[in-house]
Image (cartoon, rainbow, N blue to C red):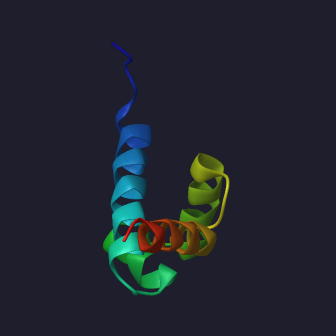
Amino acid sequence: MIVTSPIPYLCLVRLKKACSLLIQTSFPVTQISQLCGFNDSNFFCKLFRRKYSESPLRYRRKMVKQQSLKT
């Protein structure tokens, strides 16, 4: 079992929620960052890029494209 401290875990949960919102909605990134509990959208983008190696917008485009290819 991997033990992680509360703050990194909370960030991970928020980033996963952001991924869902990026794919399922057309909300702007700033709004998604706020909905996921990030007060600073620049900080959100920095964490997102660190975790997923791409910007939230690029992630959205990639995932939406993948979903459209499945249908």
Q: Residue at x 56, y 69 (%)?
A: 56
Q: Residue at x 49, y 65 (%)?
A: 66
Query: Dividing the picture into quarters, in which one does residue 6 lie?
Result: top left
Q: Residue at x 42, y 68 (%)?
A: 67
Query: Dividing the picture into quarters, in which one does residue 16 lie?
Result: bottom left
Q: Position of residue 51 (x, y in %)?
A: 58, 47
Q: Classify residue 42 as left or right of residue 22.
A: right
Q: Nearer the viewer, residue 25 or 6?
A: 25
Q: Classify residue 7 as left or right of residue 55.
A: left
- Callout count: 0
Taking the view exactly as shown, the residue that stands out farthest to the top is: 1
Q: Position of residue 32 (x, y in %)?
A: 40, 76
Q: Residue at x 37, y 39 (%)?
A: 9
Q: Nearer the viewer, residue 60 or 29?
A: 60
Residue 16 vs 20, above or below: the answer is: above
Residue 71 vs 13, above or below: the answer is: below
Q: Position of residue 5 (x, y in %)?
A: 39, 30
Q: Nearer the viewer, residue 69 or 55?
A: 69
Q: Classify residue 33 as left or right of residue 43.
A: left
- The quadrant in which the C terminus is found is bottom left
Q: Position of residue 42 (x, y in %)?
A: 61, 72
- The quadrant in which the N terminus is found is top left
Q: Classify residue 26 as left or right of residue 41.
A: left
